[in-house]
Amino acid sequence: MASVRVERTDDGGFVARNDRGAEVAFGDAGQDGVFTPVELLLAALGGCEIVTVEPLTAKRGHRLVKLAATVAAEKVAPTKLGTITVTYDVELPEGDEKAAQVFADVAHRVHENHCTVGRALREETPSEQVLPELS
């Protein structure tokens, strides 16, 4: 099971922490120096894709010199995103004539089938809220 703890901090910001000690600060769009929740969603998708693409291309003998992705989406309504676009920035190894095709094939398969975050966004993933009993 994957989980994070999200909480308000003493200074009025917010932080998400995992059990391994990593944390990320976030807040609303007006705050400098922090991600918004939507930006974290986009980062999760881009991160999921490139951390999956990288070892799969390397495993096939085509280690990419540069691998980055820009993930963007417009809000089409106050609480709804339009299409999310993942744009890769890749530098292929010099003299590796098969690297471009291997990268394209792997990236396509990862986007369609192997990125958990992407599948959760494309397919209906149930979520539930558990509220404490308040007296």
Image: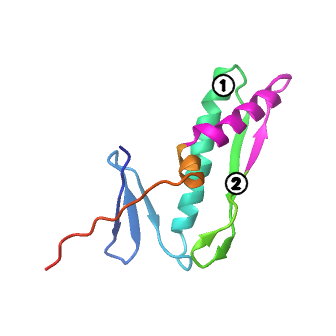
Q: Which residue has dot 2 on it?
A: 70
The answer to whether marks 2 and 1 mark residues whose Cβ atoms lie closer than 8 Å is: no
Residue 80: quadrant of the picture: bottom right
- Residue at 33%, 71% in the rendered image: 9
Image point (74%, 46%), residue name: 88
Crowd tier of the residue under label 2, counting other residues whose Cα lies within 10 Å: few below 14, some 14–19, many 20 or above: few
The reply, left or right, for residue 126 in relation to residue 62 is left
Whole-percent x and y of residue 129?
Answer: 34, 65
Residue assigned mark 1: 58
| Quarter placement of the C terminus | bottom left
> Left or right of 29: which side holds 17?
left
Residue 113 percent coordinates (x, y): 61, 38
Depth check, front residue: 64 or 46? 46
Q: Does 99 lie within the magenta span? A: yes
Closer to the camera in the image, 25 or 112: 112
- 3D distance between C-alphas at marks 2 and 1: 21 Å
The N terminus sits in image quarter: top left
Asked whether residue 56 appears in the rendered view, the answer is: yes
Magenta range is: 87-115
Is residue 34 among what the camera can see? no
Amino acid on which the number 1 mark rests in the picture: Ala
- Asked which colour scheme the image uses, the reply is rainbow
User: Which of the 4 quarters of the picture holds residue 20?
Assistant: top left
Q: Position of residue 122 (x, y in %)?
A: 60, 52
In the rendered image, residue 26, in percent from the top left (x then y), is placed at: 47, 67
Residue 20 lies in the magenta-colored region? no
Q: Residue at x 76, y 45 (%)?
A: 89
In this view, the residue in front, 119 or 9, is 119
Among all residues in the image, which is located at the extreme left?
A: 135
